[in-house]
Amino acid sequence: RKEVEQDPGPFNVPEGATVAFNCTYSNSASQSFFWYRQDCRKEPKLLMSVYSSGNEDGRFTAQLNRASQYISLLIRDSKLSDSATYLCVVKGYSTLTFGKGTMLLVSP
Amino acid sequence: GAGVSQSPSNKVTEKGKDVELRCDPISGHTALYWYRQSLGQGLEFLIYFQGNSAPDKSGLPSDRFSAERTGGSVSTLTIQRTQQEDSAVYLCASSPPYLDTQYFGPGTRLTVL
C-alpha cells in the first residue's frame, strides 16, 4: 500500500457544485494531516490542516477517520478559482509525505 | 513578510555539468526541506534539515546529490554530473519551530539537455 494514496482525477464539475476528495494513508502512527493546493506550474500552498474532530474553513470542510486511515476534503459551491490540484499530506516519523494529488477542474 | 525564495528560477545545463540551487528560508524557520517534482508527478522528498541536527538524507536518489545548510539559514542543493532524468522542478520549503506546516518557495526549474 502506498504511503499516501489519492484518486488522480481529474474531477470535472460545474460552478456551484459540491465535490469531495478522499485520501488514504498507510502509517497508522501518523499524527498530522493537511490539505495543500497546487496551481499549474506553481508551488504547493497550505489549504488547511485536518483535525481529529473535523474542521471547516468557509466552503472547505476536512475530515479525518483514524480507524479507516483516510482523510477527506469537501468543497461546497465550487468556484472557477478552485481549479487546481489538491494534495493530501501526512506527517510520517519526521517529514511530510505528499500524495500525488487530485486534479479539480471547475467549469462555467 | 518575505516568503521562501529560490534561485535561479530556471536553469538549463548540459548533461555532465554540476549545478547549484539555492534556497533562502523564511527568517526564524528552523526546518528546511528539499523536494523535486517531475512533470505530472507528485513531490519527491530529497533532504530535511532541522536546526543543528544531522540532516535526514534518506530521499537523495544518488550520491551525485548533496545539500548543505550554512548558519542554519540558507541552503544549497548541489547536483554533480547532471543527467537528463534530473530534469524537474526543485522545491524548497521551510517550517517554523514546533509546527509541521511547510511554506514553499517558487521552485527552480532544471532542464538537463
Image: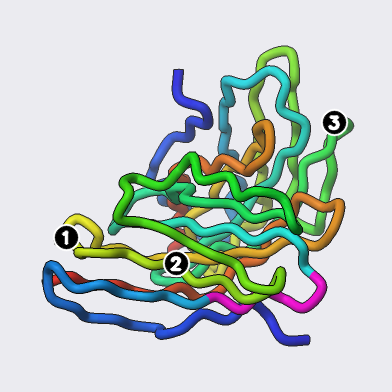
**In the rendering, at what x and y percent does residue B67 appear?**
48, 62
Magenta residues span B23-28
- Type of amino acid at the residue the image marks with label 1: Gln
Q: Is residue B80 visible to the viewer in this orientation of the structure?
A: yes
Front: mark 3 or 2: 2
Checking the image for residue B83, the label placed there is 1
Q: Locate residue A9 relative to residue B23 in the image: left or right.
A: left
Q: Chain of mark 2?
A: B
Residue ID for mark 3: A52
Q: For the residue carrying disc 3, how many other residues have a C-alpha within 10 Å: few (<14), some (14-19), or many (20+)?
A: some
Name the image quarter holding residue A68.
Answer: top right
**Separation of residues labelled 3 and 2 (CA atoms):** 36 Å
- Type of amino acid at the residue the image marks with label 2: Leu
Q: Residue at x 75, y 20 (%)?
A: A66
Residue ID for mark 2: B77
**Separation of residues labelled 2 and 1 (CA atoms):** 15 Å
Q: Chain of mark 1?
A: B
Q: Are marks 3 and 2 in contact (CB under 8 Å)?
A: no
Q: Is residue B98 above or below residue B10?
A: above
- Asked which secondary structure carries label 1, the reply is loop
Q: Are marks 1 and 3 in contact (CB under 8 Å)?
A: no
Q: Locate residue B24 relative to residue A106 in the image: left or right.
A: right
Q: Residue at x 72, y 86 (%)?
A: B2
Q: Residue at x 62, y 43 (%)?
A: A96
